[in-house]
Amino acid sequence: MALESEVQTILTRIQSQRDEMLRQLVLWAAINSGTSNLTGLHQLGGLVLDELRTISDDAQAISVPPQLVVDQHGDLKERVIGDVLLGVRRAGAPRQAVLSIHLDTVYPAESPFQKVKQDGDLLHGPGVADAKGGLVVLLWALKAYEEYVESTGNVNLGWKVILNSDEEIGSPASREVFSDHCQGADFGLLFEPCLPNGSLVGQRKGSGNFEIVVRGQAAHAGREFHKGRNAIVAAARVAQKLHALNGRWKETTINVAKIDGGGPTNVVPDTAVVRFNVRYPAVDIEDALNAALDHIVEETEEGITLIRHGGFFAPPKPMTKEYESLLKIVQANGKTLGLDLSWESTGGVCDGNRLAALGVPNIDTMGVRGGNIHSPQEYMHCDSLIQRTQLTFLTLITLAE
Ligand SMILES: [Zn+2]
């Protein structure tokens, strides 16, 4: 494709902004923003909001309700969640885009992994790939796009930016913000890291997180063992039944992840919590899964009660016609930049699942190229900052038409 001179000028300018982008990323990655670190999230959010304000008609921090979590005693507790940042530009334009990524990382304030280090083309540090690199790409691509609007007068495309603080725990509080602000959007771009080989993600499975709270009867293990109803043993039976569901539905997995409960060895334990995750390829499996889980909860034994919490929080993201044509647009723009892009399926989920369920076709791996995410070996290729910013910029131009 022959590029107009405005476009070529802006692509070249993006190239020249490499050091500035990298400096910003190093600064932001050095601010710990683990999902529970509200102070760190607030500090990072303040800096990002300042940037977002420079390109938005309106940008603000929105508070979200607390998440209800089942604690280790089987009781519901409130967990406070950091703000969502929302930026809006040209809300009345005929075509509307949603651009989104999360501010939180998986590394808590006390994590030993805090330092950012550059080694040639590699940048090591917490969240450099997942997803602060993508955050930088999103903002600089929009800056570039607004320069393009300025020089061409093309105001066909408006956008919303949504930056949430709870993606790494499944967006329990921010998912409402997505449903309030994304319906009717023409397309979405999310800036999760692409795969280490540069590929995009195509289809994604759905995911659900559940807890089954098991209540029995406590008793002295020596004096009145017979009066006790052992919640740990009942929880173990539940875990066995859940695990046995593996293989029942195609490509569907049930992972029993944790059992909380118990205490001193001379007490029959009266409480346990079984925590598990479900991955499934198609939304129509949800009903069958629900029925199977109900059956396990109903089929309890005398003196033991079982209560289920949780749910399917990220519906599957299947390949649709609209989705495929969006991928092809990005692929063609990649070609213009000398990038050979393809896409692969994954069992991992992200906010792209939620956006797809709201009817917004979206590509969710527009972020930087890196790897070893969610580990102290996380890294990013510095050159991908430029590549992905240029790719996003070109894609916005194409989709504005
Ligand atoms: Zn992420």
Image: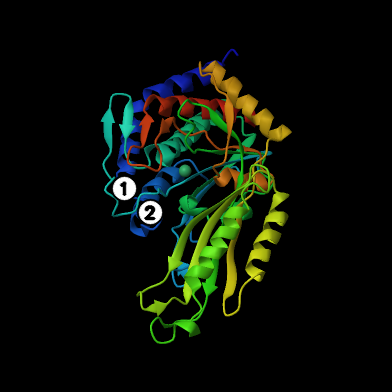
The percent coordinates of residue 207 (x first, y second) are: 59, 50
Neighbor class of circle 1 (other Cα within 10 Å; few <14, some 14-19, many 20+) is some
Neighbor class of circle 2 (other Cα within 10 Å; few <14, some 14-19, many 20+) is many
Q: Classify mark 2 as within 8 Å of ligand 1 or not, answering yes or no.
A: no
The percent coordinates of residue 329 (x first, y second) are: 63, 25
To which quarter of the image does residue 29 belong? top left
Q: Is residue 300 above or below residue 368?
A: below
Residue at 40% across, 22% down: 15
Count of numbered badges drawn on the protein: 2
Q: Amino acid at mark 2?
A: Leu
Residue at 69% across, 53% down: 286
Q: Amino acid at mark 1?
A: Ile
Q: Nearer the viewer, residue 139 or 123?
A: 123
* Mark found first going from the N terminus, 2 or 1: 1
The percent coordinates of residue 144 (x first, y second) are: 48, 30
Looking at the rendered structure, the secondary structure element under dot 2 is helix
The percent coordinates of residue 246 (x first, y second) are: 61, 49
The residue identified by callout 1 is: 31
Q: Nearer the viewer, residue 87 or 291?
A: 291
Q: Nearer the viewer, residue 248 or 364?
A: 248
Q: Is residue 91 visible?
A: no
The residue identified by callout 2 is: 41
In the shown orientation, is residue 8 left or right of residue 154?
Answer: left
Q: Classify mark 1 as within 8 Å of ligand 1 or not, answering yes or no.
A: no
Q: Quadrant of the C terminus?
A: top right
To which quarter of the image does residue 240 belong? bottom right
Q: CA distance from mark 2 to mark 1?
A: 8 Å
Looking at the rendered structure, the secondary structure element under dot 1 is loop
